[in-house]
Amino acid sequence: MIEFKFPDIGEGVTEGVLLHWLVKPGDKVQEGDSLCEVETDKVTTEMPSPVDGIVERCHGKVGETIAVGDVLVTFRASDEKNKKDETDKERAKDPLKEKPAEENAGVVGTLDVSEELMETSREGIPAAKPSAGMPEKVLATPVARKMAHDHGVDIRQIKGTGPAGRVMKADIQGFESSQPKDLERSPTPPTTTHGSDPVERMKLSNLRKAIMKKMVESTSSIPHTTAMDEIDVTSLVEYREKVKHLFVDEHQVKLTYLPFIIKALTTALATHPRFNSQLDVSNQELVLIKAYHIGIAVDTPEGLMVPVIRNADQKSLLALQLEAEKLSRAARERTLKLEQVKGSTFSITNYGSFGASFGTPIINHPEAAILGIGRIEQKPVVMDGQVAIRWMMPLTLAFDHRIVDGGDAGRFMKDLTRSLTSPDDLLLR
């Protein structure tokens, strides 16, 4: 027998949620075939088979959390099939022999339909004796069970409309719509643990746990220093207005300021390589990275994700815009692949899209710096002794003071400003 364990896929991933199985016991698989789909705090990914063989057992049920090192699938090699058949015949001849555990005991089936009687999750529901006549176990699809858990609904209260009374996703939605509005929000009932004030408790998602860990790691290990400036980007605004219709007409894509910022950024990074580096503390060395992989912070319903545009210096404005849109959409839909969220060398966060001007972004450890972009707006500016209305862009550069000094940051910002205020020169690079 061969045991396949949930592997350490890197990037600090320690656990995941089993979304659904793509194989079942008895299936013959080849190396590289997908076995199941797992959602981690960063990505949703399929687990490939490490060997050729026959699936003996699938461990774990849909919706369960699995940790790195947990057994996912047990295989038997194809040449072991005859041996198993002979063993089964021997057991059939001798009924007194101990029967093995049911092979399918840990298998739920597909994500949408389950023939198995599954115990209702108690997570997020206060322990209490069931009401008279209320069953301890119910038939429900995994999708319905997960929705009930996420929305704080006791699935035992719902009458299923599926086959054999199985609770379906539509049953959960119908139950919620019939409840008073003030009861829909809280996944757990309010408790009075803050003096006499009512509170609401929300279970942290895997993504939020990962963000917490990353932020603590960054702020506790990196001495953050911040430089701020507000630059005149009137020429950039005018240039974008002049060419944006071409992107819509020819490529059906909206041109934003992000591709220009990435272009200017990679130019500045090439001149100031310390900002595109990582500190190897154990060897007391500074690692200067000779590629420019730009992380772009994306706000999603579940929390902040940072997909990566690889080799950004080699891409055109159109290619940068298309890839940024593709990655942002995948981040919001939780369809990013692991390789799309790892390996960034410098990150950008655009809080200007939410109306903010200045912020103090936290460095994406182990990078050396991060650039924050504020809201572009018109302001009165004194030019040659005259007041003029100009388009101004706030910039914030947070940097690791172990790697970069204030003078380095000032020179970096100066070169970045030069590129952003001269879009014609920028496009020639």
Image: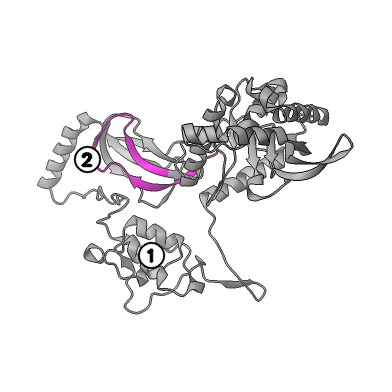
Type of amino acid under label 1: Gln
Q: Is residue 314 above or below residue 235?
A: above
Q: Nearer the viewer, mark 2 or mark 1?
A: 1
Type of amino acid under label 2: Gly
Residue carrying label 1? 173
Rendered location of residue 273, percent (x, y): 70, 22
- The residue at the point 12 percent across, 42 percent down is 89
In the rendered view, does 113 fall on the left or right side of 149? left
The region drawn magenta spans 9-38
Tell which residue pokes out farthest to the bottom in this image. Answer: 132
Q: Quadrant of the N terminus?
A: top left
Residue carrying label 2? 26
Q: Secondary structure at mark 2?
A: loop
Q: Is residue 104 above or below residue 9?
A: below
Tell which residue pokes out farthest to the left in this image. Answer: 93
Q: Is residue 15 magenta?
A: yes
Tell me, for residue 28, which label it has, or none. Answer: none
